[in-house]
Image (spheres, rainbow, N blue to C red):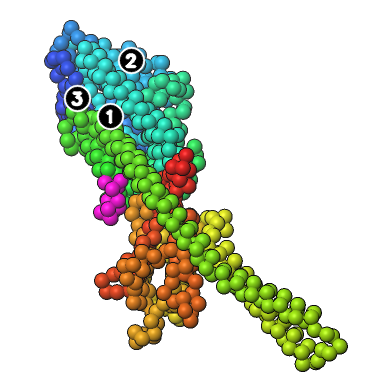
Amino acid sequence: MLSRILIAGLALFVISLAHAEAPRFDLQQAGNHELGQYIEYWQDTTTDTPLAKVSHLDQWQATSSDNINLGFSPSPFWFKTIINQQTTDLDWFIRITYPPLDRIELYLCKQEVISTIESECELTRTGDRIPFDQRERFNPNYIIALDLQPGANFLYIKVVTEGSYQLPISIIDEQNLNEYLAINNFFRGSYLTLMLVMMLYNFFIFIMTGSPTYIRYSGFVFTFALFYLTYEGSGFQFIWPQWPALNQYAMPIAFSLNLICLILFVVKFLNIKRTSLITYNYFNILLGLTAIALFLSPVIPYKLFITLMNILSMIITGSAFYFGLRYWRKGQSAARLFTIAWAVFIIGVVTANLRALGVIPSNFFTEYGYQIGSFIEILLLSLALGERIQRLQSERMIVKQALIQEKSDRMSALQQLIIGVSHEMNSPIGNIGLSNSFLIDIHQDFQKKNLDSLSKADLVEYLEQQQQALDNIESSTTTLTSLTQVFKSVAIKKRDHPALEFDFISLIQDRVLTFNERLTFQLSVPESLALHSHPSAFALVFNQLFENTIAHFPKNMGLDKPQVSIAVMQDEFSLKIEICDNGEGLDKAELAQLFLPFFTTARGSRKKMGLGMYQVKNIISDIFDGTIEASKPENGGLQLTITIPMPDNELADNYSVDKVLSNTLA
């Protein structure tokens, strides 16, 4: 009997000792006091254990950080702490600064072990699954008033959520709370206002310029602000306060839309479609996965969806940063600010996450690291787009000046063409005139002769002379017809060369294969280059240039076949093609006349009219709004440099040669 009493007493002592070691926070002065290190937690695997039973448990686990983060869990968590009230003249509030929690039940009890909740505890329910107007304070964070009694006050909190179990909790007096709410409201309002300004700023630029990059960026800023509203709780606070069920879908949808707009913007801003089909397809796969997630968001469990989207977000954000850095190293100036912007954003997100994990202390910059980083990112990206505007204006002025010179050159070329046409057509027209005069003369002579005395030999001679003249007329007419066709082919019409999606490198390889038996090629080109342009016009240019190389290659150089090297390069705004051969080249005077009509160094026996390079120049300038320059490399031969604005570029889209020419002539 005595042994049983001793065992029971020992058990009571152990239980009382366990309760005596429960965490306790001594509330001695005003301020905002973090409670994380004074809280214990227990996971309710049965999901519905009542407080009366929970309060008797001794399996509580201590936390080691002010920022409690238990990750995702299918079961709710209970948290408890003891607040030792030593000041009686202040009003106190619990502050939980993580809005995405679904349901929170807070019990303020008079004692640690509970028998009857109604008489021993005060219960407050809140969360983003409860209408917003039931909250004590008009703020997305959870603010709960505490009626603390002097001495020990026992606090139990039950949290149920489909998202992450984070509990950044503190106790704060009313004066400090009001100051915090004022700062918090000002900062949130300022942040959203600045986001709205940035969105409208870029949207108006889109209206003025028509550049698709700006509308994509406006969409990215808008959806990012929408995601922020859903994550931070302002959307629930101001837009749908009476429909808490929307919170289950609002953030997943906003998250997905933001990632979609982000991918579209990154692809357009970095010109990925034109630089690498592999990278472009990679981002298309990410875009497809994000779109699928968007459509499945209403049926995918919230916990699984957020986990998958976080992984996808890290991949997309990391990819944007990596390719921004890669294009920066390649010399793309706009990628510099783009990469810096993403670096700042990533630093802000990492800072906020490290603060949440308790790795770094909590202060203004770490608490709002996500917002600060995202705003600086958006500001820098706007500056990067602004730099594009300046470039656009600069390029436009250059194009205007080039067009003035082009107009002068074309007038000179037109004069040369008229003179050349007159010269080429003069001989056949003269022959026709002489033959016609000859026919008239022999006909008049024939009429003067006496038909009775006309011999067979005279008749045969007359017919032969007539046939000779007719043959001469027919030959000259054929020559004139041929010349007319040649002159018609010089006139380049854009409608004869439709714009298509094609791989420029494949087109070059096809031309190389066609001329491979007569030429030797060296290629320095990327693996692929997607363009929306005029492939038939490109093919015509390559055909003419390769035929020129073959026709003008000297036979005394001891080589079986001429050699042609082709290099393709691109920067942010243009495509550059360099074509070199190993022929004799041209001197300075000949280079100056190369693109004039009827200039050729092979007019004699090879019957070259000298219109090929003139036609090439017209194709480059009229169809591609580009330029072509000729030079003689140090190692000899002829080098042609073709520069073409990228077909899908803002400069080409909005300030094409035709538009600028019309403005110039006006």
Mark 2 is on which residue type? Arg
Between marks 3 and 2, how big is the CA–CA gap?
20 Å
Q: Closer to us: mark 1 or mark 2?
A: 2
Report the residue marked by disc 3: 34
Q: Looking at the image, which residue sits at the far top?
A: 89
Q: Closer to us: mark 3 or mark 2?
A: 2
Query: Could you tell whether 502 is left or right of 160 in the image?
Result: right
Q: Nearer the viewer, residue 599 or 147?
A: 599
What x and y, as percent, mark residue 349?
Answer: 27, 38
> Is the residue under label 2 in contact with that under label 1 (CB below 8 Å)?
no
Q: Residue at x 32, y 22 (%)?
A: 189
Report the residue marked by disc 2: 137
> Where does the magenta region start and end?
327-336
Estimate how packed mark 1 is, as few (under 14), some (14 to 19) or many (20 or more) residues with alpha carbons within 10 Å.
many
Picture disc at residue 616: none
Query: Could you tell whether 571 is left or right of 531 in the image?
Result: left
Sequence-first tag of 3 and 2: 3
User: Circle 3 — which element?
Assistant: strand
Sequence-first tag of 3 and 1: 3
User: Circle 1 — which element?
Assistant: strand
Q: Tell whether position 223 is magenta.
A: no
What x and y, as percent, mark residue 391?
Answer: 33, 43
Report the residue marked by disc 1: 167
Q: Residue at x 34, y 84 (%)?
A: 557
Q: Nearer the viewer, residue 149 or 423?
A: 423
Q: Residue at x 47, y 27 (%)?
A: 245
Q: In this rendering, is residue 332 above or below 176?
A: below
